[in-house]
Image: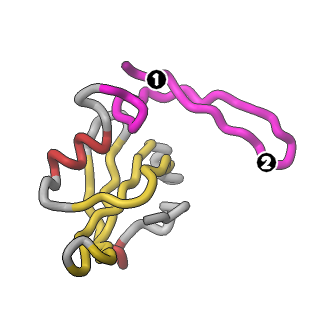
């Protein structure tokens, strides 16, 4: 199931606008295009934390979903967050980033 775009809500005016964009990969689909399942296939030995966040690269206006990964500190206690994986919502292409190399435009970091 694909989406043909996303909504932008202006926080000051509360105006809503539709941005047309093909979204094939997302966390809201129940198929092989689920970004969390894709991340699991790409990195089967990692643990994923936090919410999958919706990100827009301001230069290319490409849409990405961001998921943080790492491992447990000791016997499933505590977290050692190693970095983030960004998955392109249109193509499914991905890039892994260590914590200190996550692009500055990625917002809402949570894990």
Nearer-N-terminus badge (1/2): 1
Q: Are marks 1 and 2 in contact (CB under 8 Å)?
A: no
Report the coloring of the rendering: secondary structure
Residue 44, position as x, y percentages in the image: 13, 53
> Badge 2 is on which residue?
11
Decide if residue 85 is on the left or right side of residue 46: right
The label on residue 105 is none
Q: Nearer the viewer, residue 3 or 44?
A: 44
- The magenta stretch spans which residues? 1-30
Task: Point out the image quarter for the N terminus.
Answer: top left
Q: Residues within 10 Å of mark 2 (few under 14, many from 20)?
A: few
Decide if residue 2 is on the left or right side of residue 45: right
Where 35 sits versus 2, above or below?
below
Residue 8, position as x, y percentages in the image: 66, 38
Q: Residues within 10 Å of mark 1 (few under 14, many from 20)?
A: some
Q: Is residue 25 magenta?
A: yes
Residue 35, position as x, y percentages in the image: 31, 41
Q: Disc 1 versus disc 2: distance between alpha carbons?
A: 23 Å
Q: Quadrant of residue 82?
A: bottom left
Furthest-right residue in view? 13
Q: Residue at x 42, y 32 (%)?
A: 28
Residue 42, position as x, y percentages in the image: 16, 50
Label 2: which secondary element: loop
> Badge 1 is on which residue?
3
Q: Nearer the viewer, residue 76 or 31?
A: 76
Where 32 sits versus 104, above or below?
above
Decide if residue 54 is on the left or right side of residue 102: right
Where 84 sits versus 88, above or below?
below
Q: Residue at x 26, y 68 (%)?
A: 70
Q: Residue at x 55, y 26 (%)?
A: 20
Q: Quadrant of residue 71?
A: bottom left
């Amino acid at each position: 199931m694909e989406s043909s775009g996303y909504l932008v809500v202006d926080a000051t005016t509360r105006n809503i606008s539709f941005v047309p964009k093909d979204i094939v990969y997302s966390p809201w689909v129940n198929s092989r295009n689920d970004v969390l399942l894709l991340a699991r296939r790409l990195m089967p030995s990692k643990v994923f934390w936090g919410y999958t966040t919706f990100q827009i690269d301001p230069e290319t206006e490409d849409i990405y979903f961001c998921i943080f990964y790492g491992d447990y500190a000791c016997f499933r206690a505590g977290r050692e967050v190693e970095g983030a994986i960004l998955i392109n919502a249109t193509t499914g292409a991905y890039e892994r980033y260590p914590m200190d190399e996550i692009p500055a435009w990625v917002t809402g970091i949570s894990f």
